[in-house]
Amino acid sequence: MKITAVTLDAVGEPVRVEEVDLEQPNKGEVLVKMGAAGVCHSDLHSISGQHPADLPCVIGHEGAGEVVAVGPEVSRVKVGDRVALNWQPNCGNCFYCDRGEHELCREVTQTVWSGYMADGTSRISRNGKPLFHYSGISTWADHMVVDQVCCELIPDEVPYEVAAIIGCAVATGVGAAIHRGRISPDHRVVVVGAGGVGLSAIMGASMAGAKQIIAVDQTLEKEELAREFGATDFILSSDEDIERVIELTENRGADVVIEAVGIPQLQQLWLEGVRPGGTLVLVGVPHVDVSSLYGSANLIRMQKTITGSYFSATDTKKAIQDLCAAYVDGRLPVDRLITKRIQIDEIQDAIDLVVTGVEGRIVITF
Ligand SMILES: NC(=O)c1ccc[n+]([C@@H]2O[C@H](COP(=O)([O-])OP(=O)(O)OC[C@H]3O[C@@H](n4cnc5c(N)ncnc54)[C@H](O)[C@@H]3O)[C@@H](O)[C@H]2O)c1
Ligand SMILES: [Zn+2]
Ligand SMILES: [Zn+2]
């Protein structure tokens, strides 16, 4: 069948919206009619080369929609089901899954992230030449074939656009706050970068009852949004951010700082904003080839912890279910994160807008 999709041919080039060919689902595969897809900064990292992807591909990794066809041997979903697409499914039965560290399982993702379907071929092609499946789910397309393991059922009350962004930004931010920051009610928290992920971290900190949540961003437009999600203070970033945070936290520093931008200099700087004994959670992803430097003597003497946090930082299937439930019962106002809706042919403008940092989350609706 012919589909409309966003393709990326080479690093640094603009993306293209074009018609490409999609084969019907094979064994264990599912055809999804996309309802909505989110624009995550990680997509931009692949476009800029900061996070290399197999190219040419159909890009996008936040999406949700309706199952419209299934291949042979599909048991997880059926035609008509509403699903969120999960780019990090796990096997449920390996060293890590058995320990409850599902987010570290690579049994399934080594195939899903290969750019091909499980049989080693692609379902997408252009002029007879195969295109890679980005993150296994290539969501910036009106239809896509995915492995059934990437499909998570969602309740009827959850709109596709909400489910789409739960499938990366929301699960990532909330997971960083709850599972890696282990935020509790007596905590003073800083979230650096109030984008889709950072605002979700603020929501997560707020759900955990943190007594103080300081949002830091380079754009003033983010203040209102950050406060809406539970930030108690807002700092428009300057050279004095650390001093401001020390001042706001009874001269101690924050119990938890979450870096949700992905700039090594910020990752280094913000260790200073963490109180002795506190935790720096790194969520933003810098270029794969660069390093952040930390003075280890200081780290040792101050007993600070630096931890990474990947996607939901827990079983993604359970996280998507729990976050959908939290949205339905009003604990997690995910819909308010969406500040702009676009059509697929407006994607380049949306990408340019993400760079300015003024929007919450932009979603493509189909
Ligand atoms: N760990 C994971 O599993 C995971 C998952 C998704 C995204 N990410 C990463 O998280 C980061 C954020 O993603 P996003 O989709 O929320 O991005 P976004 O573009 O929506 O938001 C980034 C925010 O950071 C702000 N910002 C930029 N530079 C800043 C600076 N110097 N100081 C303060 N604020 C600054 C921007 O104004 C914007 O509000 C990216 O690096 C992305 O790749 C990680
Ligand atoms: Zn993402
Ligand atoms: Zn596993």
Image (tube, rainbow, N blue to C red):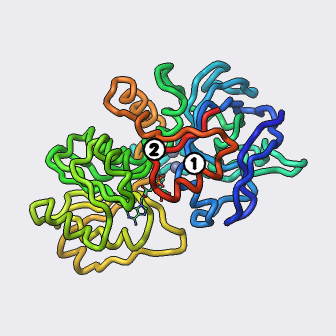
Q: Position of residue 338 (x, y in %)?
A: 47, 39
Frontmost residue, 12 versus 238 = 238
User: Which residue corresponds to mark 1?
Assistant: 107
Q: Position of residue 301 (x, y in %)?
A: 18, 75
Q: Is residue 150 visible?
A: no
Measure how far apart labels 1 and 2 are at the Cα level. Answer: 10 Å
Q: Residues within 10 Å of mark 2 (few under 14, many from 20)?
A: some
Judge left or right: residue 53 versus residue 245.
Answer: right
Frontmost residue, 267 versus 17 = 17
The amino acid type, in three-letter code, at marker 1 is Glu
Q: Is ligand 3 within 8 Å of the beta carbon of the residue shown at mark 1?
A: yes
Q: Is residue 293 above or below residue 255?
A: below
Question: Nearer the N terminus, badge 1 or badge 2?
Answer: 2
Q: Is ligand 3 within 8 Å of the beta carbon of the residue shown at mark 2?
A: yes
Q: Position of residue 143 (x, y in %)?
A: 71, 34
Q: Residues within 10 Å of mark 1 (few under 14, many from 20)?
A: some
Kind of element beneath mark 2: helix
Q: Position of residue 265 (x, y in %)?
A: 39, 73
Frontmost residue, 151 versus 156 = 156
Residue sitting at x 41%, y 44%: 314
Kind of element beneath mark 1: loop
Residue sitting at x 46%, y 20%: 157
Residue found farthest to the front: 221
Residue sitting at x 22%, y 78%: 298
Residue sitting at x 28%, y 78%: 296
Marks 2 and 1: in contact by CB < 8 Å? Answer: yes
**Count of number-bearing discs:** 2
**Which mark, by number, is residue 97?**
2
The amino acid type, in three-letter code, at marker 2 is Cys
